[in-house]
Image (cartoon, rainbow, N blue to C red):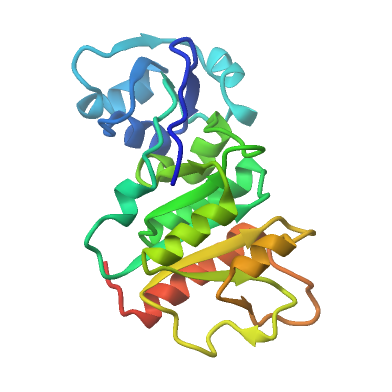
Amino acid sequence: MSKKIQHSQNSFIYIYGHHSVVDALSNPRREKIELLGTKEALENIEKTIPTGLKKRIIQKQELDSLSERGLHQGLVLKARPLSPPFLDEITKSTKEKSCLIALDQVTDPHNIGAMLRSATAFEADGILLPEAGSPRESSVMSKISCGGIEKTPLIYIKNLARTLDELKKEGYWIIGLDGKADELFGDSKLPAKVVFIMGAEGTGLRRLTQEMCDYLIKLPISPKMESLNVSNACAIALYEYNRLHSIKF
């Protein structure tokens, strides 16, 4: 169903920000290369630094150059990108309830990072991205996810329509969020195993993707605003799914 993304041994990203770095350090699937930081910031997380990891004290100006707008909080981790799991590893579990997010031409790493944060907060099982045209894991995505990228997998798939068809056979209902849909979110009970499909802002879901959906729904919002940011819509959908299925943490 999905494809393993092969990373070059020379590829790496810079993970920056306190929460993102601490979560990456505690993730056994993350290959760490070197931890950079100010003396004070390194001392503050000393107990979370794996034994043997190379660390180096550098000045704030150098950390600024390794992060977007200097949002590093004194910490930058040089690390390898994560190896995404196969979708089968998730769908073959014995869970009665399962929620996945599928992205249809959503390419902004800021939005994907925000959705990773929401997906982790509401314990979604993963985010599906078409292999062609979708961004790979990046420093920006990691920072915006606030550590979510370490806990919720990005799963790259070769063909969205074919994958959705296979997920239906696994008992998943495919639900597209579309601002032009007739049915309102909340008017019907969500199935226990769902895939929420989120489309790109502006263009929305492609016609073929819509045809693969069991049904389309829209969020009830004021006519003063045409639509929500895709990451906000994702958070609302996940919250409503958990509420309807009485999922508590």
Task: Using the image, determine if residue 71 lies above or below residue 59.
Answer: below
Q: Is residue 73 visible?
A: yes
In the rendered image of this protein, does residue 176 appear above or below residue 167?
A: below
151 horizontally vs 223: left or right = left
Q: How many marks?
A: 0
Quadrant of the image containing the C terminus: bottom left
Q: Nearer the viewer, residue 72 or 183?
A: 183
Q: Residue at x 39, y 47 (%)?
A: 87
Place of residue 198 in the rendered image (x, y in percent of width and height, measured from the top left): 61, 61
Q: Position of residue 151 (x, y in %)?
A: 35, 45
Seen from the viewer's position, the closer of residues 226 and 94 is 94
Q: Is residue 205 visible?
A: no
Across and down, in percent, residue 156 comes to 50, 41
Nearest the camera: 141 or 211?
A: 211
**Residue 121 appears left or right of 145:** left
Residue 181 lies in what quarter of the image?
A: bottom right
Residue 217 occupies which quadrant of the picture?
A: bottom right
Q: Residue at x 58, y 15 (%)?
A: 61
Q: Residue at x 53, y 86 (%)?
A: 186
x and y, in percent, of residue 91 in the image: 33, 56
Farthest residue, direction bottom: 187
Residue, x 50% and y 50% (percent of image)? 128
